Amino acid sequence: MTATRAPAGTGLPAGLGEDLAAASRTLARRLAAGGTLWCASPTSPHHAQHVAVEFVHPVVVGKPALPAVALPPHDPTTVARANARPGDVLVAVGPAGCTGVLDLVRRAPAWGLTSLWIGAGERPTAGVADHVLWLPDEAAVHDGGFILIYHLLWELAHVWLEHPGLLRPDPACDGPVCITCSDEGRLAEVVEVRGASAVVRAGQGLEQADLSLVGPVAVHDLLVVHAGMAITRLDAGPQGGAS
Amino acid sequence: MTGGGNFLYPFLDAEETDGSALSADLAASAEAKATESLELRRTSIAGLAAELDRAAAAMAAAFRAGGRLFTFGNGGSATDAAGQAALFASPASGRPLPARSLVADTAVLTALANDVGVEVIFSRQLIAHARAGDIALGLSTSGGSVNVLQAFAEGRRRGLLTVGLAGYRGGAMATCPDLDHCLAVEGQSVHRTQEAQSALAHALWQRVQREFQQLEVPA
């Protein structure tokens, strides 16, 4: 039981304004290129629906309606796996320990999704999502400060969308060859096992991966693939690697 | 530049070619809007403290007598209504109380909207479910949502306690004869109003919980 309290803090915590500006630009880039926004909030489904309705039916007359969908709370991974396409965006809402969100954000790169994670309280591990929009005070979930974050995300994304010149692909990561990761292993999700190799989903689409270095795998396992070879099988996540 | 952006961001009229300049402007703008939001949330809770106390005392009395809470609203307010029902029924800490939202069942909502009209999607559900002594809690940022107002009228006819959360100083809800308690935010934007309503709804829940902390369990 908490005591009645006024909302804490002043404005935004340090750095969150900059994080919002960067995340909203990424989101606008993907939407401008035809991407869809997938919203997931397994522990409090109304937040995912609230994010989606902001984009689909804008409160400001004249703003374009944009494709955003709330994923069902009970098995967002299965629905996202079937529907999401490379270039789409995942916006997850939930605490750092939320297993449903963790399963989605770790698979997002294999499906070609950019991930944003909105939450409050203890921060998730660095790098687990592409953009993390976080309030340090867990009480913000209920004091209106939490809804404020996705309202601002929506509003700033629309400002970016009015500047198509600033939404050209990021040369560091959006080109045909990624400058920073061309020679790195890439995350892949097993779609089908074919003896000593597997068909995997690795960012932009399906590929063949040789399994001789990793041994047996199962459908939906996550692998690190480099030059056609699966070089690592990742540990099962919070919801298991296989299904 | 065209579109609504220059209404909110006059500086966008400048022709920028550098994304970092806009990034910095947007970060500053986000900060300013967050401060505005926080101010409205604080002043709303402080200004409505007495009405929050009265509404919470009446709700606690209704719960003690076996009443149940029904929440409703449209769009973002529908999601807030769902969140409010979840907060009452399954709080992280505190006493769970019988509460559910009338926005959850798409079969019922689409049947009512298609067969009768969107103005009855909440009132008809109250006809089916509610009884005297229950609580109807409706949210409307404009204060004028017809289906929310109709649900208050139906609730009043059935002897429910009616509580409204509204923006724009209450809109039609400010003078609604069917409302026992109206918590009206002064906000002039839908988003800032929803943020203040979220804070008020939580403050309301906290006060109801406090009433239950004081409840003696019969031996």
Image (cartoon, coloured by chain):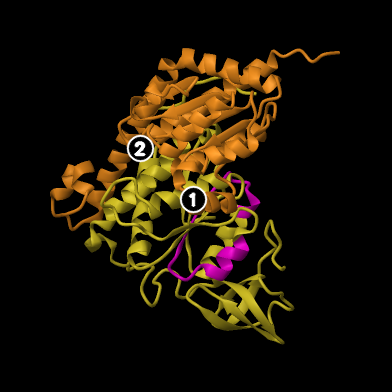
Chain colours: A yellow, B orange
Q: Which mark is residue B190?
A: 2
Vertical comparison of A19 with A106: above or below: above
In the picture, the quarter occupied by the N terminus of chain A is: top right
Amino acid at circle 2:
Val
- The residue that appears at 55% across and 53% down in the rendered structure is B111
Q: From the viewer's perspective, is B150 left or right of A201?
A: left
Q: Is residue B166 visible?
A: yes
- Tell me the crowding category of disc 1: few under 14, some 14 to 19, or many 20 or more residues within 10 angstroms, Cα based: some
Q: Locate residue A170 relative to residue A113 in the image: left or right.
A: left
Amino acid type of the residue that numbered disc 1 sits on in the rendered structure: Ala
Q: CA distance from mark 2 to mark 1?
A: 24 Å
Q: Position of residue A147 (x, y in %)?
A: 45, 39
What is the secondary structure assignment of the residue under circle 2?
A: helix
**Within 10 angstroms of label 2, few (less than 14), some, or many (20 or more) residues?**
some
At a point 41% along the width and 26% down the height, the residue shown is: B41
A44 vs A89: above or below: above
Residue under the point 66% across and 80% down: A192
Q: Nearer the viewer, mark 2 or mark 1?
A: 1
